Amino acid sequence: MTTLGTSGLEIHPVVLGGNTFGWTSDESESRRVLDAFLESGGGLVDTADSYSAWVEGHKGGESERVIGSWLAGRGRRDDVLIATKVSRHPEFPGLSAANVKAAAEASLKRLETEHIDIYYAHFDDPETPLEETVGAFDALVREGKVRYVGVSNYGPDRLRRWLEIAEEAGAALPVVLQPHYSLVHRRTVEPGLRDIAVQAGIGMVPYYALASGFLTGKYRTESDLVGRARAGAVGRHMGPEGLAVVDRLVEIADAHGVAPATVALAWVLGRPGVAGVLASARTTEQLPALMDAARVSLSEQEADALTRASDAVGG
């Protein structure tokens, strides 16, 4: 278990992503994944109100509805922490005060719960004054509808300004930051966001830590991409530097008797300021490799070897 920023929340370091629920995982499989996650010791489930609005025929909120139905059916609300996000739902775009309030109410209804444990500003909204957004999140905390505030996909300057505004106003401070971060994509976090998070005591819970599946070791040649839905996302990493990272992952994974994905997540968990790592499982069979990341202890030499390989990528 690890403490999430200054919140005092104790979480399992592997956070279950809910982007597949109601999309590539139907409701029955989603329920099985959620059950297995809890039985494996997991505790924090992460979703967003916009999941999966990008799918033809979907409106957004599909993932929240699946999770809400599961929560109601299992009666295990006290055993799980729920994080969701606002700003990208087609009916609730942006971070104006009125929109944040309305979107939160809609999420609470879909999730069939009285409170959201962590509520994220999903993407920055430069059209809305930060003072207004900070105040809207603080109001939800004061009303008891949200326990803790998180931010996702914010640049260093905007995150720093959010913290300044909240401190000046005595508003709820963000306790968690969710950035894009992996062995083949570090520039978003290092050094700017990392240094702010460490100094402010904000726990980072990165997403895309497996680089759309590239760091699972399944993709080693161009032929491995043929017919794959993620070919475009994975293909950008298929150069010699990226493949060298995969080679190190496979080598270290074999030494530990685990999957390459496990080692990729374990490396992220060992980085400064990281409190947890976000990962999705479409099926229960994919879950053990993710959960193993919390128990695998990389040696200093292994972590350094991965970091050196990552340095060469320059991502």
Image: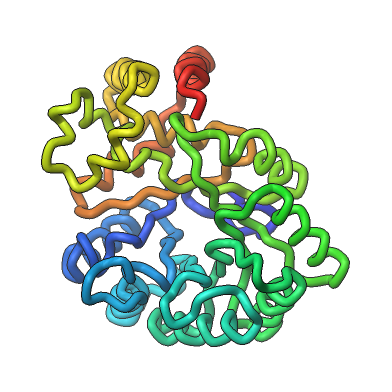
Residue 21 percent location from the top left of the image: 27, 65
The quarter holding residue 141 reads: bottom right
Q: Is residue 107 above or below residue 179?
A: below
Residue extending farthest to the front is: 127
The quarter holding residue 17 reads: bottom left
In the displayed structure, does residue 272 sit left or right of residue 219? right
Residue 125 percent location from the top left of the image: 61, 67
Q: Is residue 143 above or below residue 153?
A: below
Q: Is residue 74 visible?
A: no
Looking at the picture, tell me which residue is in the foreground, 32 or 261. Answer: 261
Residue 100 percent location from the top left of the image: 58, 80
Residue extending farthest to the right is: 168
Q: Is residue 158 visible?
A: yes
In the displayed structure, does residue 313 sit left or right of residue 7? left
Q: Residue at x 26, y 28 (%)?
A: 217
Residue 153 percent location from the top left of the image: 56, 54
Q: Is residue 70 above or below residue 232?
A: below
The quarter holding residue 219 reads: top left
Q: Residue at x 13, y 28 (%)?
A: 223
Q: Is residue 18 above or below residue 186?
A: below
Q: Residue at x 22, y 76 (%)?
A: 57
Looking at the picture, tell me which residue is in the foreground, 73 or 115. Answer: 115
Q: Residue at x 63, y 82 (%)?
A: 144
